[in-house]
Image (cartoon, helix red, strand yellow):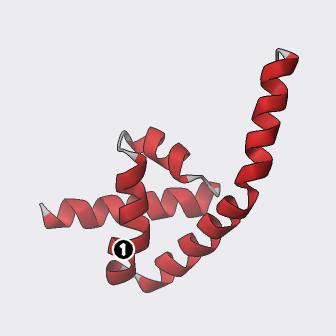
């Protein structure tokens, strides 16, 4: 079972790095919860592959900094009927 978790963490990391994806997008793509993705990226990946962890951390920090913009954009589209 441990290998599957490690493989999943690496696959999730590769997906996030390749697509600059959000935690939510990665969770949807792999059929796991956002909590699982977040734990894999912030805790497990650090122990498995430090280089991937650093790359993912940068992307997740950028996504966190931009999330208020995405939320405002989504609300704007909602009320415009798009």
Lateral position of residue 13 relative to residue 64, left or right = left
What element does badge 1 sit on?
Answer: helix
For the view shown, which residue lies furthest in the top direction?
A: 81
Q: Is residue 24 above or below residue 47?
A: above
Q: Is residue 51 above or below residue 29?
A: below
Name which residue lies at 78% across and 22% down: 78
Number of other residues with Cα within 10 Å of mark 1, as a class: few under 14, some 14 to 19, many 20 or more:
few
Lateral position of residue 15 relative to residue 9, left or right = right
Name which residue lies at 43% across and 48% down: 34
Question: Which quadrant would residue 33 be assigned to in this image?
Answer: top left
Name which residue lies at 36% across and 74% down: 43
x and y percentages locating residue 44 in the rendered image:
32, 72
Return the residue at label 1. 43
Count of numbered labels shown in the rendering = 1
x and y percentages locating residue 39 in the rendered image:
37, 63
For the view shown, which residue lies furthest in the right direction?
A: 80
x and y percentages locating residue 25 in the rendered image:
54, 44
Lateral position of residue 34 relative to residue 5, left or right = right
Lateral position of residue 20 relative to residue 3, left or right = right
Depth check: give the residue in front, 41 or 75.
75
């Amino acid at each position: 079972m441990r290998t599957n978790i490690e493989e999943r963490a690496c696959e999730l990391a590769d997906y996030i790095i390749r697509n600059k994806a959000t935690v939510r997008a990665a969770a949807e793509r792999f059929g796991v919860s956002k909590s699982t993705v977040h734990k894999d990226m912030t805790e497990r990946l650090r122990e498995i592959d430090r280089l991937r962890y650093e790359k993912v951390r940068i992307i997740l920090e950028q996504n966190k900094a931009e999330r208020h913009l995405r939320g405002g954009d989504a609300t704007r589209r909602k009320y415009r009927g798009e």
